[in-house]
């Protein structure tokens, strides 16, 4: 943890899907591109706000990939210049850094090239986009967990892991079946 925790971490509010979330991501991406330019390998809108129809915390999650995250002097000052604030530094977890946006309504996850976590984020997002039954089950799970962890907001994210792991297992199993001989 770096500095003060964002106020948005103090409570969990799940809202119905808002189509404006995609526009908020697009605006944030534009700002990031202006600030970092060619340092950016890619940006992705991930997390629940990136899945049309999915209820979510109204916080935009963005995966930002750079060549390397170790030399923070190459990107943190530029991000601070557009209002982001570093809140997590996790070099042991694939070089992860996390910043929050000026209004604390954006979680910016910064990863180095080759980090596996952004791939997991995209796989999970894409599964929920194409599997409406799981999307609805995830929404119900999140609403239930938000109620169950109301006095322990920090437990909310951890409590979702079982569901996320099940979805990822299904994603990998489906990919494996497609790669078997005779599965064309």
Image: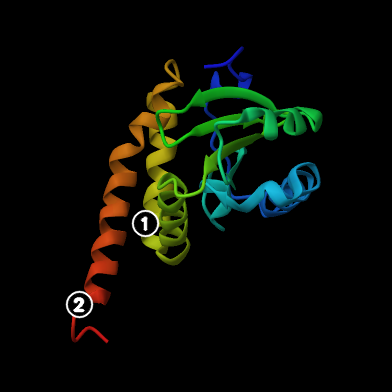
Residue receiving disc 2: 180
Q: Callout 1: few (<14), some (14-19), or many (20+) C-alpha neighbours within 10 Å? A: some
Q: Position of residue 91 (x, y in %)?
A: 46, 28
Q: Quadrant of residue 36?
A: top right
Which residue does the image show at 27% across and 59% down from the upper left?
A: 170
User: Quick check: can you spot residue 102?
Assistant: no
Which residue does the image show at 31% across and 53% down from the upper left?
A: 167
Q: Position of residue 165 (x, y in %)?
A: 29, 46
In this orientation, which residue lies closer to the viewer: 22 or 90? 90
Q: Callout 2: few (<14), some (14-19), or many (20+) C-alpha neighbours within 10 Å? A: few
Residue 134's disc is 1
Q: Position of residue 65 (x, y in %)?
A: 57, 47
Residue 33's disc is none
User: Quick check: can you spot residue 97?
Assistant: yes
Which residue does the image show at 20% across and 77% down from the upper left?
A: 180
In this orientation, which residue lies closer to the viewer: 44 or 55? 44
- Residue 1, compared with residue 42, is above or below; it is above
Indicate the secondary structure of the residue bearing disc 2. loop
Q: Residue furthest left?
A: 181
């Amino acid at each position: 943890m770096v500095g003060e925790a964002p106020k948005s971490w103090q409570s969990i509010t799940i809202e119905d899907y808002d189509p404006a979330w995609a526009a908020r991501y697009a605006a944030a991406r534009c700002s990031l591109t202006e600030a970092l330019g060619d340092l950016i390998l890619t940006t992705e809108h991930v997390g629940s706000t990136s899945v049309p129809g999915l209820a979510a915390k109204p916080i935009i999650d963005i995966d930002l990939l750079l060549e390397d995250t170790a030399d923070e002097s190459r990107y943190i000052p530029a991000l601070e210049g557009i209002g982001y604030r570093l809140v997590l530094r996790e070099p042991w977890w694939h070089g992860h850094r996390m910043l929050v946006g000026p209004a604390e309504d954006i979680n910016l996850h910064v990863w180095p090239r080759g980090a596996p976590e952004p791939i997991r984020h995209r796989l999970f997002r894409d599964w929920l986009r194409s599997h409406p039954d799981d999307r609805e089950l995830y929404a119900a799970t999140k609403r239930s967990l938000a109620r169950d962890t109301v006095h322990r907001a920090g437990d909310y994210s951890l409590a979702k892991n079982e569901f996320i792991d099940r979805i990822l297992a299904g994603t990998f199993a489906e990919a494996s079946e497609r790669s078997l001989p005779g599965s064309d």
